[in-house]
Image: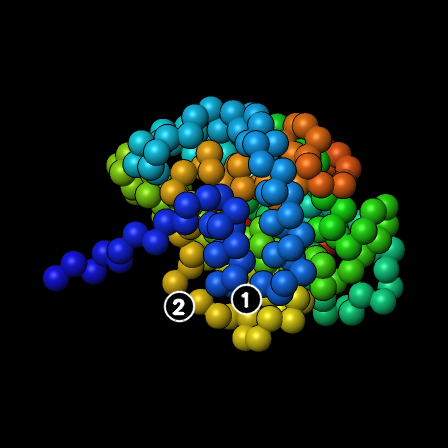
Amino acid sequence: MSLKPKSTRPSSLAQALDRALGHTSTPTGIRRWVLEPAALGAAGFVAVSAISSSAPATASRESTDDVGAFISTTEALSLTILTELLRRTSLHPEVPSDVSAIFDAVYAAELDHWNFISQHYSPSTTRFWIPDGFFGGAGDALDLTAVGKGVSAGETLFINTYLIGVTAFAEAGRSEFARYCAEIAGNESEHRLLGQTLAGASPPNNLGFEEFVYDNVGELGAAAMQAGFGFGQQGTAPGAFYDLPSAPMAPLTPISSNEPR
């Protein structure tokens, strides 16, 4: 008896992202914010090669170099987002201290991820177009519900990225790196839970198994661009360019297990 589930692969990236966001109980607002740029059609697919040098049909055909470079790029994006989030949080005293402390710890974790992966793979870019909607508005605006929705949607894609990494590195006979991907995916799942909580999802821990909607990093890159993000170029949603700091600030909150085991 086979335990392999029947394929439920969506027919389009927009449908796949809708499915992922729907299964994570992401509120309607963020689904609209993420999916509306997808209506722009082919614009979301421009320069996928800027993120991944190829987009093979399945994860088993992707090189570990392609996967590693994409992971490095997404970690650079994550750290860039967290740097800006902490800047805005510092300007909003109404943010509860316990929420601010969690943001500080998330930043510390993403810095650990970046410090590790950047030793092994270089990102395709460290300049990103981030939609204003992720933070709740332009400039110094900050809306915690919007942030929660953005984190929930983003982590859904990032967790999927590491699941691809598990497969690619395992099939290449690199079992240790496959485990490293699993270790980071577990941490990113904690961040998704944070996002779900801020967004008001009930319950926020609503999955028995993590979603595996995309099976190659080319599609993941296209999905991110459909959500309005830009990798070294302007995205399709209103926003601004942000650069990964050449010398990221030290974490404000100490956390443990700072390297993969």
Distance of label 2 from label 1 (alpha carbons) = 13 Å
Task: Give the answer, above or below, for where 95 lies relative to 164.
Answer: below
The disc placed on residue 101 is none
Residue at disc 1, secondary structure = loop
Is residue 257 at all visible to an observer of this figure? Answer: no
- What residue sits 50% from the left and 34% below the top? 70
Q: Which residue is mark 1?
A: 25
Q: Position of residue 47 (x, y in %)?
A: 57, 25
Q: Tag 2, which secondary structure?
A: loop
Q: Are marks 2 and 1 in contact (CB under 8 Å)?
A: no
Q: Nearer the viewer, residue 54 or 187?
A: 54
Q: Which residue is mark 2?
A: 208
* Quarter of the view holding residue 56: top left
Would residue 214 be visible to someone looking at this image? yes
Mark 1: few, some, or many residues within 10 Å (few <14, many ≥20)? many
Of callouts 2 and 1, which one flags the residue occurring earlier in the amino acid sequence? Answer: 1
Task: Pick the residue in front: 33 or 183.
Answer: 33
> By what rule are the colours in the image chosen?
rainbow
